[in-house]
Image (tube, rainbow, N blue to C red):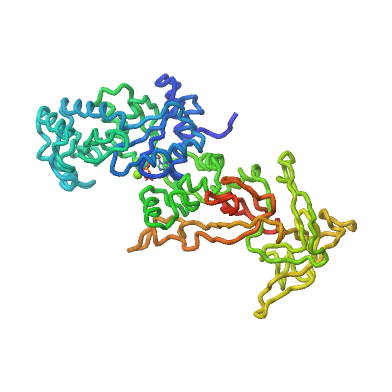
Amino acid sequence: TESRSKNFIEEIIDADLASGKHSQIVTRFPPEPNGYLHLGHAMSICLNYGLAQEYKGRFHLRFDDTNPIKEEAEYVESIKTDIAWLGADWKEHLYFASDYFEQLFEWACHLIREGKAYVDDSSGEEIRQMRGNLTQPGRESPFRNRSADENLDLFERMRKGEFGDGEKVLRAKIDMASPNLNMRDPVLYRIAHAHHHRTGDDWCIYPMYDFAHGQSDAIEGITHSICTLEFEDHRPLYNWFVENLPVPHKPRQIEFARLNTTYMITSKRKLLQLVKEGHVTGWDDPRMPTLSGIRRRGYTPESLWEFCKRVGVAKRNKLNDLSLLEFCLRQDLEAKAVRRMAVLEPLKVVITNLPEDAKETYSGPNHPGDPSMGEREVVLTREIYIEKNDFMEEPQKKYFRLAPGKEVRLRYACYITCTDVIKDADGNIMEVHAEMDPESRGGSTPDGRKVKGTIHWVSATENVPFEARVYETLFLKEDPGEVEEGQTFLDNLNPNSLAVSTAFGEPALRGAAVGEKFQFERKGYYCVDLDSRPDALVINQSVGLRDSWGK
Ligand code: ATP
Ligand code: MG
Ligand code: MG
């Protein structure tokens, strides 16, 4: 009973099912294992897996591993981990394009026999030149009219390893005058004497993306092959192969807009550069837009699904707001995350009318809206920490937090009134003295007087110290790929993207496990980082609260 209107891909699927073209749909996610998955890939996974779920179809995970030079087994493993984390279940449907190398080779021979492919001895540069550009037709290669027998012989010898890298390629014979450059005799195979992470040294010729992709779809019975808009111009070629080869099934390519998000780079090549050059600590640096980075930062699969759903399936590229992604995380964690108090920039407050050894325990709900999440104990002692910015010596108007002579409520505990400000010789505030109203224990007084400010706090003696990592965006520009002349995207890096400090959390934080998530009251959502050790917690800020003011 969903009321949203269907997107254009669902409309295509509805029509295909209604006409009987398909009885069941099959989608796939086809990553190239040449890097870690990023937020853009999450969009493609949610879309393809989501459609398979919605229509009770099948979802395939297929590694598009046709380029041994850039691909590694490490990437295959990380990609599986990330997809499983998102909750997309490929079940037994795990495939590798490299498993189709023999079939693809046979189909290439088929094209040669039909006079639709030829071996070209031209160099890559010569082929580029001959291909021409949009304003002029291409020129035919001098090797274009080799006989089928000669081509078959040469292609077999390419496979056997008789030629060096770049000496020959196999090209489709289509149309050198086509207005679509992809149709001007595209390269189908190239020679690469490179070790493949799965096929080892079995092959020294490898199919190009265009020749491998659609045929892999055809082999697997993919009904709707969904890809991003930059492949729109490749669709005629995709269809040409499907029409000109004895494929068992005819898939259909559908293009949609890439997911682009402000302040993020989503290009594996550039992300690899950030890692290799040490601008970040690794693919899973919490500032990275990779799924491993986002996960480590504290994002949940549910928040990514919600984000992808809200962005929706579009036919035109646009830049989506990072704030929408953050909104989706807050919304998810607001319901799930337990509340804790932590002070990130501590200022000591001495409650002078409490004895040195005072240890008062109060309890606070783990979640204000969900009693089933239980309660935790907080401990009040004579010395506590509050946030530096929760105290002002000369308060502005409407400042309802602590100030000389002013009273505030310590969350869950009692009221205190500031009595004194202690400074060093240079006038820096060292600590603040206050007195508690003993009648206010529990958070209210018999006279029912109001205090306008409630602040969070942590005992200065009963606490869990931790390393807080607070992030800004990795890039300063909304579109980091947009650069001034003579600059690169690296010039848009934010030098202040990470701030580390020693912070203090309430005792209930003790023993928190890697990945555990909290709302630090009045601060934001936080997640225990991978670098954490039992005796040395490291906690990331996942996202701030929209209104950290006054709450
Ligand atoms: P990159 O440019 O980062 O290398 P890619 O498209 O080359 O990305 P692939 O591994 O080939 O990476 O992508 C697997 C699938 O994910 C493809 O179907 C691709 O269209 C899709 N995809 C990649 N980036 C995005 C994005 N930003 N938004 C939506 N889908 C994407
Ligand atoms: Mg790709
Ligand atoms: Mg790529």
* On screen, residue 227 above or below 539: above
Task: Pick out the residue farthest to the right.
Answer: 447
Report x, y in % for residue 381: 76, 60
Give the image quarter of residue 208: top left
Q: Nearer the viewer, residue 144 or 189?
A: 189
Is residue 193 in view from this perspective? yes
Q: Nearer the viewer, residue 105 or 527?
A: 527
Q: Nearer the viewer, residue 398 or 351?
A: 351
Is residue 398 in view from this perspective? no
Report x, y in % for residue 516: 60, 45
Q: Residue at point 40% right, 51% down?
A: 271
Give the image quarter of residue 154: top left
Dividing the image into 4 quarters, which one contains the N terminus?
top right
Task: Pick out the residue farthest to the bottom.
Answer: 425
Report x, y in % for residue 260: 44, 48
Q: Quadrant of ligand 3?
A: top left
Give the image quarter of residue 150: top left
Q: Residue at point 78% right, 65% down?
A: 351
Report x, y in % for residue 25: 43, 25
Q: In the rendered view, does 236 fall on the left or right side of 146?
A: right
Q: In the rendered view, does 329 fall on the left or right side of 19?
A: right
Q: In the rendered view, does 205 fall on the left or right side of 337?
A: left
- Please tell me how many numbered marks the rendered image carries: 0
Q: Residue at point 47% right, 63% down?
A: 495
Dividing the image into 4 quarters, which one contains the C terminus?
bottom right
Q: Residue at point 48% right, 45% down?
A: 292
